[in-house]
Image (cartoon, grey):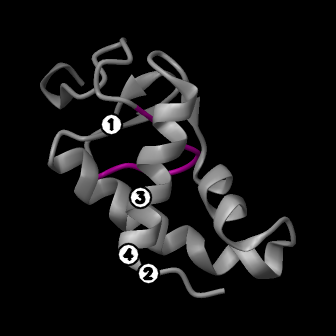
C-alpha cells in the first residue's frame, strides 16, 4: 500500500496521541499500522516515514529520539523512536544534544 505524506503524518500524530506523554513509538509501528504486518508491505514506508518525522521535528510537532535523547534531525543514524516534543530527556530541544 502506498500511503500519502498526509496519511503518514496523520498516523504518526494519532499513534503518539494514543500513547500519551512520555511514551514513544517506532517507525515500524507507523508502517505496520498503515500497511500490515508483512515486511514487504510496510518496508517501503520506512524512508517516507523518516522524511516526514524529520519535517515534523523541525516544525516542533514531534521529537526524534535515539537512546532516549533528542537527535539532530539533519544528522542521525540507526534505530530511532518518535515522541511528543515534551517527552523528557531534552526531547524537542536539539540545542542540548
Q: Give percent across and percent down for residue 47.
A: 50, 72
Q: Which residue in the protein does label 1 denote?
A: 71
For the residues labelled 4 and 2, the Cα–Cα distance comes to 4 Å
Q: Give percent across and percent down for residue 31.
A: 64, 63
Q: Residue at x 25, y 45 (%)?
A: 57
Q: Residue at x 44, y 81 (%)?
A: 4
- Nearest-to-viewer mark from 4 and 3: 3
Q: Quick one: SS at disc 4?
A: helix
Sequence-wise first label, 4 or 1: 4
Q: Which residue in the protein does label 3 denote?
A: 10
For the residues labelled 3 and 2, the Cα–Cα distance comes to 10 Å
Q: Quick one: SS at disc 1?
A: loop
Sequence-wise first label, 2 or 1: 2
Q: Quick one: SS at disc 2?
A: loop
Q: Which residue in the protein does label 4 denote?
A: 5
Q: Quadrant of residue 18?
A: top right
Q: Nearer the viewer, residue 33 or 43?
A: 33
Amino acid at each position: 500500500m502506498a500511503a500519502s505524506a498526509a496519511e503518514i503524518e496523520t498516523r504518526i500524530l494519532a499513534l503518539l496521541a494514543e500513547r500519551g506523554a512520555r511514551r514513544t513509538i517506532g517507525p515500524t509501528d507507523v508502517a505496520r499500522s498503515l500497511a500490515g504486518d508483512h515486511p514487504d508491505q510496510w518496508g517501503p514506508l520506512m524512508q517516507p516515514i523518516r522524511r516526514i518525522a524529520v519535517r515534523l521535528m523541525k516544525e516542533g510537532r514531534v521529537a526524534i529520539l535515539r537512546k532516549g535523547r533528542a537527535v539532530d534531525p539533519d544528522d542521525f543514524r540507526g534505530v530511532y523512536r518518535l515522541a511528543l516534543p515534551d517527552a523528557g530527556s531534552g526531547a524537542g530541544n536539539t540545542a542540548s544534544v
